[in-house]
Amino acid sequence: MFKSKVIHGNKHGADIGYPTANLEVNDALKRALDKYGVYAVKVHVGDKIYKGALFWGKRSLFSDPDLVCEVLIIDFNENVYNKELDIDVVSFMRNIIQVSDESELKQLIKNDIEKVKNSIQ
């Protein structure tokens, strides 16, 4: 488990219909995520636990030069800016896949969400 503060991002996820919580990259996060890619996680928000798909690495489609960590919290629609989230890493799901357009990215995210839903009890 690691803690990270939700920070403002570029809103790429929201723009394509999959809003994410961008996480501050800290030492705890770097220790918990041993390779770049997508992870199935449990996200603690207050006294509730949500399933999530977490991305850690460089975005291929948006040409962002920085490493980013963002989590798509499934069945969640609240403002968590500036809040600290507790993240339980359940499993590594896949490496980063280069995509050529938003349509391809949306399909990847949709597949990741289904995998998370099926893999976390």
Image: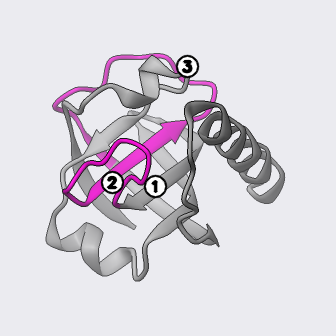
Q: Residues within 10 Å of mark 3 (few under 14, many from 20)?
A: few
Name which residue lies at 32% across and 64% down.
2
Q: Secondary structure at mark 3?
A: loop
Q: Which residue is the site of mark 2?
A: 69
Alpha carbon distance from label 3 to label 1: 16 Å
Q: Are marks 2 and 3 in contact (CB under 8 Å)?
A: no
Placement of the C terminus among the 4 image quadrants: bottom right
What is the span of residues highlighted in magenta in the rendered image? 58-85
Q: Residues within 10 Å of mark 2 (few under 14, many from 20)?
A: many
Work out whether residue 80 or residue 110 is closer to the camera in this orientation and state it: 110
Name which residue lies at 36% across and 41% down.
62
Instruction: Judge from the rendering whether residue 25 lies leftward or rightward of residue 49; answer left or right.
Output: left
Q: Secondary structure at mark 2?
A: strand
Q: State the predominant SS element of the stretch in magenta.
A: loop
Name which residue lies at 25% across and 48% down.
64
- In the rendering, which numbered label is found on residue 73? none
